[in-house]
Amino acid sequence: MTVAFGANTELSRCFARSIRRSDQQPGPIQRFSHGFQPLSVAADKLGATRSSTRNSRRVFSVAKNNSGESLTYKDAGVDIDAGSELVRRIAKMAPGIGGFGGLFPLGDSYLVAGTDGVGTKLKLAFETGIHETIGIDLVAMSVNDIVTSGAKPLFFLDYFATSRLDVDLAEKVIKGIVDGCRQSDCALLGGETAEMPDFYADGEYDLSGFAVGIVKKDSVINGKDIVAGDVLIGLPSSGVHSNGFSLVRRVLARSGLSLKDKLPGEDVTLGEALMAPTVIYVKQVLDLISKGGIKGIAHITGGGFTDNIPRVFPKGLGAVIHWNSWEEPTLFNWIQEAGKIEDAEMRRTFNMGIGMVLVVSQETSYRILEGGGGDYKAHRIGEVVSGEGVSYH
């Protein structure tokens, strides 16, 4: 059995855990359905306005706080290196980690499992009152991980925890989870609602999600056939997605703006731009996989390009990213300038407008790009090269 862990700050640890004892109080509210048929509804087309590039960046007037210090993710309380060190230690106990999902053999197939949350994006949900889409984020973070192995999501489970259950608010969150399952064509099989008095602030809650998919053993996408000269194809994101919000919130505080203020240069508020739900790539990626030629897939989450792309490469290979090959959403320009964040920090924290990266042969890249990725956009963003790490040009 191969067990895989996501090597980013929000660690996805796919250990089997003991269930709650029946005599343990207070008990959870468990929600399960049996015989739930997969839902099939076309995914919403999500995307942020991409009106500027690295070569023609807008200059925003945001420096209401005159601090000249450059902000980092670590300054905001998230230490990616510490997370990586924990993964290395776990690897000693459970060899075989490093992928985006955990694989469990089942006949001629693998079950592929993933788990995640939405991090401190929840803080913005509490502040904006936008709860209807946070469930989409929750589903996206897990199903996008498992589809990188070529797995079709089968079902999803959620965990909703709060100090005092607000039924109306919880219903909004669950509706978003249902929507995310529709977009990824998987069943919401069940979940757990935990009411824990005094554990969370009034009106706040936490979320976790768990997805399981399946892929034939001879169809697993694992990167082993990647060679120098292969092409990196980027699929656009809708914005920040669900990573980096501890740094985003620090930038927002420094800028002097509120979530109700307009994003400079755009006709949306900062709250609306930041709360844009994570794109669910499942249908697009599975469609591209069905046509052949996909060698590796990286979900760009915590760790950005710098840490996530190399996870799909064999040893001795790295990547060159062409930074002007797609339009960077205005939101990232604002975050960088308001926080005075260095390029390297941005690239290791945020998706920068590309939420999923496919590694393909030259021939496959022509087919994908000429076809526009089907009904979706796709960009050639770089190449695989000899050597290790990610460089930017």
Image (cartoon, helix red, strand yellow):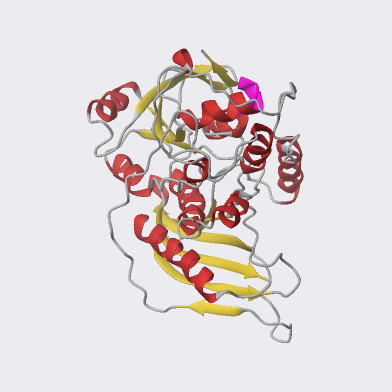
Task: Please say if 109 is above or below 178.
Answer: above
Q: Is residue 98 magenta?
A: no
In the picture, measured across the screen, residue 169 lies left or right of residue 238, that is right
- Residue at 47% across / 28% down in the picture? 330
Stretch of the chain drawn in magenta? 339-346
Task: Please say if 228 is above or below 233.
Answer: above
In the picture, measured across the screen, residue 47 lies left or right of residue 256, that is left
| Residue 366 x %, y % | 27, 23
Task: Please say if 161 is above or below 51.
Answer: below
Magenta stretch, main secondary structure, is helix
| Residue 104 x %, y % | 53, 57
Q: Quadrant of the N terminus?
A: bottom right
Quadrant housing residue 199: bottom right
- Number of numbered discs: 0
- Residue at 71% across / 81% down in the picture? 21
Residue at the extreme bottom: 23
| Residue 103 x %, y % | 53, 53
* Viewer-proximal residue among 270 and 144: 270
| Residue 77 x %, y % | 75, 41
- Residue at 26% across / 31% down in the picture? 372
Q: Taking the image as drawn, is residue 2 in sight?
A: no
In the picture, measured across the screen, residue 45 lies left or right of residue 23, that is left
* Viewer-proximal residue among 345 and 322: 345
Q: Taking the image as drawn, is residue 202 in sight?
A: yes
Task: Please say if 66 is above or below 74.
Answer: above
